[in-house]
């Protein structure tokens, strides 16, 4: 059995497991399951106990960086620049649009109120479940991680340096312009993107505008969607 044939079922299992977890959390939120309240209160108590001026000074700007204005600006910039339009601009914009469409639909279907405004460190309106900032960050930056890893495996020549950066085991002309960045830089960018998408979710709990299960649900839905996105990335 080939590597491709053994990998496909794993991808489907990952998709099914995380989608099932998201559905379970959603149903629990809608039905007001007791574990939702217990979990949210326990995690909120821990998060709020960590509040201090230095941490607040870091997490408030971080959580604001996930606003639609920031994500839109990044997507527009990547779409404008010729060297990033095809390889990053279009895929990341597609992930951003998908996330907005999904969380807006789900928010207005579920209509979960946010935590009490007295807990908020920032102003935030609208419904709470799922966390839009969290879902957008995991889809956009998760897609970036998939793209970086894919290009590192398949690209041969860096368009920025014209130097060979990938294994020349087989040749395809369209790979000459894929933006491989070298192993060290690729790993560093992937680690930064992964840390950012995790911290974005945690920051939403810390600033008090989301219940912990809002973030947990978004993580599950995002991880489920990254499974088919990874298949799409392989076709780029």
Image (cartoon, grey):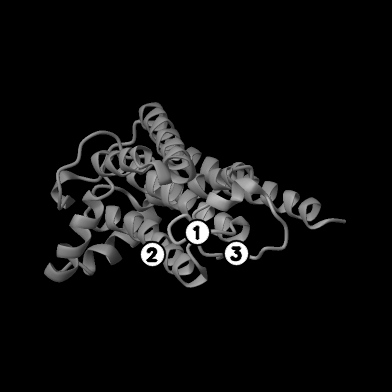
**Coordinates of residue 14 in the picture (x, y in percent):** 64, 51
Residue 52, above or below 86: below
Of pointers 3 and 2, the one earlier in the residue sequence: 3
Of pointers 1 and 3, the one earlier in the residue sequence: 1
Q: Badge 1 local density, few (<14 within 10 Å), some, or many (20+)?
A: some
Q: CA distance from mark 1 to mark 3?
A: 9 Å
Q: Along the line of sight, which residue is nearer the eye, 11 or 93?
A: 93
Q: Badge 3 local density, few (<14 within 10 Å), some, or many (20+)?
A: many
From the image, tell me which residue sits under label 2: 192
**Coordinates of residue 48 in the picture (x, y in percent):** 23, 63
Task: Name the residue furthest right.
Answer: 1
Element class at badge 1: loop
**In the image, what residue occupies the spot 45% across and 45% down?**
88
Q: Is residue 58 visible?
A: yes
**In the image, what residue occupies the spot 15% across and 49% down?**
122
**Coordinates of residue 149 in the picture (x, y in percent):** 55, 59
């Amino acid at each position: 059995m080939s590597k491709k044939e053994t990998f496909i079922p794993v991808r489907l299992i990952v998709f099914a497991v995380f989608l099932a977890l998201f559905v379970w959390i959603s149903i629990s939120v809608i039905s007001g399951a007791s574990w939702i309240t217990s979990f949210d209160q326990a995690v909120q108590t821990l998060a709020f106990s960590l509040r201090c001026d230095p941490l607040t000074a870091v997490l408030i700007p971080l959580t604001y960086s996930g606003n639609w204005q920031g994500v839109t600006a990044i997507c527009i910039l990547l779409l404008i620049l010729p060297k990033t339009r095809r390889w990053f601009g279009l895929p990341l914009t597609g992930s951003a649009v998908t996330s907005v469409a999904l969380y807006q639909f789900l928010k207005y279907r579920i209509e979960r109120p946010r935590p009490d405004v007295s807990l908020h460190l920032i102003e935030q309106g609208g419904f709470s479940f799922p966390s839009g900032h969290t879902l957008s960050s995991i889809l956009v930056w998760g897609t970036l991680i998939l793209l970086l890893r894919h290009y590192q495996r398949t690209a041969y020549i860096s368009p920025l340096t014209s130097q060979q950066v990938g294994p020349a085991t087989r040749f395809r002309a369209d790979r000459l312009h894929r933006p491989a960045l070298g192993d060290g830089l690729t790993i560093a960018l992937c680690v930064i993107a992964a840390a950012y998408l995790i911290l974005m979710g945690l920051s939403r709990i810390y600033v008090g505008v989301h219940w912990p299960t809002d973030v947990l649900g978004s993580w599950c839905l995002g991880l489920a969607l990254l499974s088919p996105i990874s298949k799409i990335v392989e076709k780029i």
